Image (spheres, helix red, strand yellow):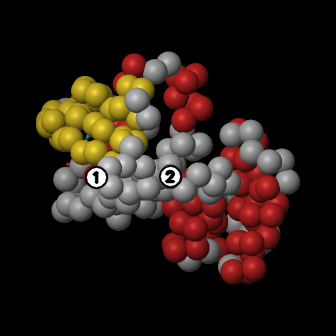
Amino acid sequence: MSRERLLSLDVSVDYAGKPGVLRNVSLEVNRGEIVGLVGQSGSGKSTLAMAILRLLELKGGSARGQIRFEGRDLMTLSERELRRIRGKQIGLVLQSPMTALNPALRIGTQLKEGWRCHGGDPAGWRRRAMELGEREPACGRGFPPALSPAAQRRAGAAGLDRHGDPASPAAPAGG
Ligand SMILES: Nc1ncnc2c1ncn2[C@@H]1O[C@H](COP(=O)(O)OP(=O)(O)OP(=O)(O)O)[C@@H](O)[C@H]1O
Ligand SMILES: [Mg+2]
């Protein structure tokens, strides 16, 4: 059965002072498919995830090539258009959750902020925080450093699952 193409890319990435980190890496993901990217530490898995979301500039990197998502080339979209895709249609769960979560803010506060930014159901963050709290009591009104790394990762991912489209890919950076 042929499936609709969701993502197809062919990208090269350079960092300032470290050119050629990725050279014409290409892959395709069809709707409903799960694709894992495996490689040794430093091979560029996180770099590719950041390139897909056009966040490499934050790390001093630059990407060339094409990243087509649902027929649109992400490389040519405006920041405004990208903001509609980031966190809604493409999520990124970072491997080091403590660098993604603010250690000084309660988990619930951070869920609420993410929910508001993405225009989700206003009551949704509270429901999600309670679900998390049932499984991870420390999550309820807790701060990130009180959680295990796995629970921190689940808390980070909780901010992404409110849109509920199982066909949309997350782009998790490899561990
Ligand atoms: N901001 C940066 N500036 C310069 N080089 C960088 C930067 N970030 C990553 N690199 C280099 O790019 C290469 C790919 O790194 P990346 O973090 O994407 O690898 P990874 O496959 O995710 O590794 P791991 O499995 O350890 O998470 C590595 O050689 C790394 O040193
Ligand atoms: Mg990585």
Side (left or right) of 132 relative to 149: right
Counting from the top left corner in percent of width and height, residue 104 is at: 69, 57
Judging from the image, what secondary structure is the residue with disc 1 in?
helix
Q: Is residue 83 visible?
A: yes
Q: Is residue 46 visible?
A: no
Can you name the residue that lies furthest to the front here?
Answer: 1
Judging from the image, what secondary structure is the residue with disc 2 in?
loop
Q: CA distance from mark 2 to mark 1?
A: 22 Å
Residue 116 lies, with reference to residue 133, above or below; the image says: above
Kindly tell me whether mark 1's CB lies below 8 Å from ligand 1.
Answer: yes
Side (left or right) of 16 relative to 68: left
Disc ID at residue 167:
2
Residue lying at 50% horizontally and 44% vertically, measured from the top left: 90
Residue lying at 36% horizontally and 49% vertically, measured from the top left: 3
Residue lying at 71% horizontally and 62% vertically, measured from the top left: 107
Counting from the top left corner in percent of width and height, residue 1 is at: 33, 55
Mark 2 and mark 1 lie on one chain; the one further toward the N terminus is 1
The quarter in which the C terminus is drawn is bottom left
Would you name the residue on which mark 1 appears? 45
Side (left or right) of 77 relative to 60: right
Amino acid under disc 1: Lys
Q: Quadrant of residue 172?
A: bottom left
Counting from the top left corner in percent of width and height, residue 113 is at: 73, 46
Amino acid under disc 2: Ala
Instruction: Give the total of numbered labels.
Output: 2
Counting from the top left corner in percent of width and height, residue 40 is at: 19, 62
